[in-house]
Image (tube, helix red, strand yellow):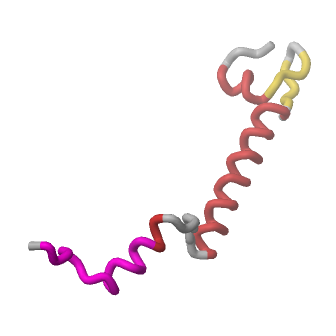
Amino acid sequence: MTEPLFRKDAMTPRSRSLSGAVILHAHIPTLIITALVLATAVLAGSVLWFGQVQTENGPARLLYWLLGRES
């Protein structure tokens, strides 16, 4: 029972990967879709926050107007 459980040549690549750098790999289409979703969300948020509508009481921020809190 002094023999190792796994062969040495089978464990060598495993031990190298434990001390190496972690590389997260994603496909290019996934990165493009993620970037498009984030850009769309930022654009929509910017329009809601900075957009203005003209009301009877003067200009109001679009977000407040949509929520019914004209100020």
6 drawn magenta = yes
Image position of 18 (left or right of 61): left
19 drawn magenta = no
- Residue 4, percent across and down? 20, 75
Along the viewing direction, whichever of 35 and 4 lies nearer the viewer: 4
Along the viewing direction, whichever of 28 and 42 lies nearer the viewer: 28
Query: Which residue is pictured at 63% across the width and 75% down the height?
Result: 28
Along the viewing direction, whichever of 46 and 22 lies nearer the viewer: 22
**59 vs 32: above or below:** above
**59 vs 41: above or below:** above
Along the viewing direction, whichever of 11 and 55 lies nearer the viewer: 11
- Residue 45, percent across and down? 73, 39
- Residue 57, percent across and down? 87, 13
Image position of 10 (left or right of 23): left
- Residue 54, percent across and down? 87, 26
Query: Which residue is pictured at 71% across the width and 15% down the height?
Result: 69
Name the quadrant containing residue 24.
bottom right
- From the image, which quarter does the C terminus lie in? top right
Query: Which residue is pictured at 86% across the width and 17% down the height?
Result: 56
Residue situated furthest left in the rendering: 1
**34 vs 41: above or below:** below
Name the quadrant containing residue 51.
top right
Segment colored magenta: 2-15
Count how many numbered circles sit on residues in the image.
0
Image position of 4 (left or right of 21): left
Name the quadrant containing residue 68.
top right
Residue situated furthest bottom in the rendering: 9
Query: Which residue is pictured at 51% across the width and 65% down the height?
Result: 19
